[in-house]
Amino acid sequence: MFDFYQHNFGVLSPFIAEEIGDSIDEFGEPLVMEAMKISLSVGKRNWRYTYGILKKCREEQVKTLEDVWAMEKEFEQRKKAPAMTETCPNVPGIYQHNPSEVEA
């Protein structure tokens, strides 16, 4: 875990090493490793971002890798959805044809 950090994030200070160790104790190695991978995948090479993911796991009571993946998928969907309404506030919703409605 510590080697992974050094190879992908940079120099491992004693403080960060202690934080990683505490996080492993609380969340387990698989979740800490996955949080680091998520951080790297979005171009965030710092422990604070990784720890933010872990805090979200705590809040959402995420316990497994599958839960982490579901949380990330939901986050990505929420991130995309509001952008449409914010950039185009006057665009009506998606039209859904209702055959029972009579057209005038």
Image (cartoon, rainbow, N blue to C red):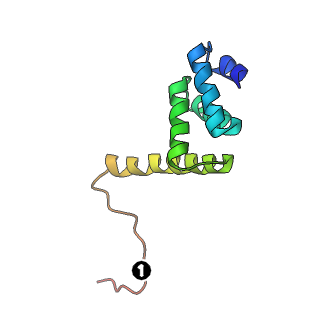
- In which quadrant of the rendered view does residue 23 lie? top right
From the viewer's side, name the closer residue of 11 and 72.
11
**Helix or strand or loop: what does disc 1 sit on?**
loop
- Residue bearing mark 1: 98
Residue type (three-letter) at the residue carrying disc 1:
Asn
* Quarter of the figure that contains the N terminus: top right
Residue 94 pos. (x, y %): 40, 64
Residue 37 visible in the current orientation: no
* Quarter of the figure that contains the C terminus: bottom left
From the viewer's side, name the closer residue of 41 and 49.
49
Neighbour tally class for label 1: few under 14, some 14-19, many 20 plus, Cα within 10 Å: few
Residue 33 pos. (x, y %): 67, 33
Left or right of 57 in this view: 99: left
From the viewer's side, name the closer residue of 49 and 93.
49
Residue name at image x 67 percent, y 48 percent: 64
Where 70 sits versus 94, above or below?
A: above
- In which quadrant of the rendered view does residue 25 lie? top right
From the viewer's side, name the closer residue of 61 and 103.
61
Residue 14 visible in the current orientation: yes
Where 4 sits versus 93, above or below?
A: above
Left or right of 97 in this view: 43: right
Residue 9 pos. (x, y %): 61, 20
Residue name at image x 42 percent, y 76 percent: 97
Residue 39 pos. (x, y %): 57, 31
Where 84 sits versus 29, above or below?
A: below
Where 61 sits versus 46, above or below?
A: below
How many tags in the picture? 1
